[in-house]
Image (spheres, grey):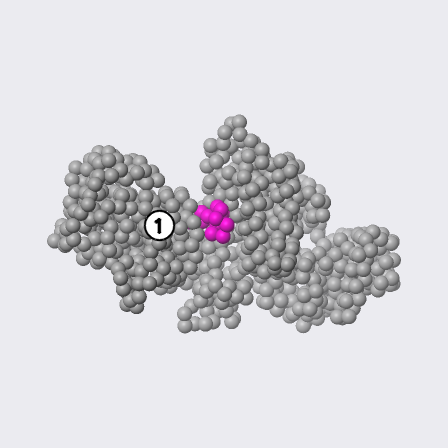
Amino acid sequence: MGVASMVLYLTSSFIPYQEIGHYEKKDPGECYGFFEDLRQEWPESAKILYIPCDPLDDAANDHQKKCILGAFEMKDLKVSDLRMVTDEDRKKLPELVSWADVIYLSGGHTPTQLAFMKRIGLKEALLSYKGIVIGLSSGSMNAAYNVYLTPELNGEAVDPNYVRFLEGLDLTNIEIIPHADYLKQTSLDGRDYIKDIVIPDSYGSRFYLITDGSYFKVKNGKTVFRGVGELVEDGKITPLKQGTVIPYMGVYEQPVIKTILEDGFDLVVSVNTTNQVCEIYHLCEEFSRLFATSRLKYSDICFRLSQMIWEDEKDTFLINVALPNIRKELKEKGSFVKTVHIDSESGRRAKNVRVREVPGYPDWILFVFYDITTALDHDWMTDEYARTGFVERAKLFLKELPADGHYSLVYTNVKGFKAVNELFGDKNGDLVIFQTRDVLRKYLKPLIMGRLESDHFVLITSDENLTEANLKAMCSQSFRIESKEFNYEISCGIYAIGNSNVEITQLIAGAKLAEKSLKAGKGTFFAYYDDAMKEGYLLQRTLLADFERGIEDNEFEPYYQPIINAKTGEIVSAEVLVRWRHKDFGMVSPSDFVPVLEAEGKISVLDNFIVERGMELVARRTGSGKKIVPCAINLSRIDFYDAAFIDSIFERINKLKLDTKMIRFEVTESAYADLESKALDYLNEMKLQGIRILLDDYGSGMSSLSMLENFNFDIIKLDMGFIRKIGQNDKVESIIITTIGLAHMIGAKVTAEGVETEQQLKFLRNYDCDYIQGFYCYKPMPESEFEKLLD
């Protein structure tokens, strides 16, 4: 048949083991389809060029030639000629390579063979070769760019001068270790082969430990694995799934200049961790437009990267790459690796963030952002598919979907998972993830399952497994560790697969919408995606598409909700809110557009609009001598990672010559909990300039007391969820009374949000609440109406 380009097979061994000098023709077996695959590439009658390990070892070479020729004959792979290369063939090697249909890299002692290959110039001779290359054992190892020379002979494992890594033929970056089953039972120089030799050598590298019969096929840039194997990387061993893999390059073990020139690297930057100064070494073309200047601080780089990331990962990205978190992980693990997903010009891609310390420069780190889309096949932690692997396998499943089949995609979320980590630690949090995986396997019997990130799983299962009994049993779980017990729920969204034409990303998005539709405290932990959810989703996407036009066309309007003194009823301040008077939909509720703007990273644009309009009102009324009260503006968590936005606040205050006592900023409890030290510095700077800082939605999160300890908030706003239960729940009333007293003890005032009844107002007055905000007093109103009220 012949091939138009090189086809490379990396095998552990495809021939039955026999002692040298004792050859008997034996059927090699199927070897996970190796011979069947090889037959698709094999010419009508092959001319084989045999590359020995040691050309002077006649016995070993004669034996191995008999074995491979016997195997090819038994599998009906015809061979017309076989020639063995010797040292004398160095000058005519290009001619021999051109003659061959198949080049066979024999097994043997890896360093000995590699030295022979270099003497004859095999690497250079193969540069333009178009044909089949088959490696067996050491031949497969020496095919790599960076060859791992596993110790084989007595004394090599303990020899400090034994070289473990050398440059090979550069046909692939797959570094295989053959004969896995044998090596696991072997020791060398008194050392366990895997535990004491391979694993210590794996830091900064990725080895593929494979069994006999297993093989890799490399063709047209694509690498496929068939058989049984394991990945050994950075001291960890994980199962190797069959299917497409990508060769690995140990980035940080190479010089920086070589690193930044490798294809696939989007961004390489060194960061001074003391002052955030960055030196950008490399930007891909697409990122060059994103980073118009190389004079950027680390926080600027992270913020701009966050704008590209999928909406369900934005919330955690900036937290994960905060310098304190990176330093902590570098100290504990020696490296920092995170995976994110972005939308790019070439479609949706998976990216790795890798950070390492720079040897000899303790204040500097190397930050690399690069593409791993085809590499991200399985989740190392749970041994299930990761996002990319799941999406690819699910696409194949949909193509082969039976016409009479009834299947659904299920998206799951562990409610309160953050609390598990906080209460029991990250290690036990991982155990909850394992338990969740096992529960899903038990009750839903997935055909395909993957972990998208953190505690979120996605799977495809037959509808017969989605009984109410199964779902109820699955959703309610208990985690026990020593004397502690924690009850948690697994909530899930379900998308019934109606036909094979639907996009897998649409299925995931729909199931996720269904899961998000579940209301806390309602006792329901699963929901099916329906058309109403689709309408809501489409509305959000339409509003997102219209957002920038809406800003330009002045469709957004500031609304003001007055806040009164609880004792006197006097208006003492106001919260600045926003309404969207859409050209097609009319007045749109903030609950319809704020969440999608936050998820898409565009909320800062809206926040900037509110800051600008709120400050203009204060400046205009102050300048004309009219009454004005302090106006509180909400800031989103993401605002604090945009240094330019924060700087613009201070610049606007100075330009308008505002009395800082007239400007206040509200930060929600959940947003404050996620802020890193740099963001907290901005809050402290605001307080130093006389701006009051309000803690919004107090009591809605889980870290309330620690927040009060760590930052001196001027005003604490009680979450309206508490206020609504006044007169209905004695415990809630006790919490409110205690919170008011606690706030006063630490020098803070208290505002009650969402006051809607006279009973609530009287209760709050009786227990010394300072300020009242809610429909019972004043509803949010347009700016003109608010000004009339003040006049």
Q: Pick whichever, 224 or 505, lies toward us.
A: 224
Q: Was residue 562 drawn as part of the magenta stretch in this picture?
A: no
Q: Quadrant of residue 8?
A: top left
| Residue closest to the far top | 404
The local secondary structure at tag 1 comes to helix
**Which residues are drawn in magenta?**
375-387
Please tell me whether residue 541 is drawn above or below residue 187 in the rendered image.
Answer: above
For residue 501, side relative to residue 361 (left or right): right
Please tell me whether residue 58 is drawn above or below residue 157 in the rendered image.
Answer: above
Residue 104 x, y percent position in the rendering: 23, 46
For the C terminus, the quadrant is: bottom right
Q: Pick whichever, 271 or 450, lies toward us.
A: 450
**Callout 1, which amino acid?**
Asp
Residue position for label 1: 181
For residue 375, side relative to residue 650 (left or right): left
Residue 74 x, y percent position in the rendering: 24, 35
For residue 595, side relative to residue 218 (left or right): right
- Residue 346: in sight, yes or no? yes
Q: Quadrant of residue 623?
A: bottom right
Residue 627 x, y percent position in the rendering: 80, 64
Q: Quadrant of residue 100?
A: top left
Q: Was residue 377 drawn as part of the magenta stretch in this picture?
A: yes
Residue 451 x, y percent position in the rendering: 52, 47
- Total marks shown come to 1
- What kind of secondary structure does the magenta stretch mostly adopt? loop
Q: Name which residue lies at 46% across and 55% down.
A: 352
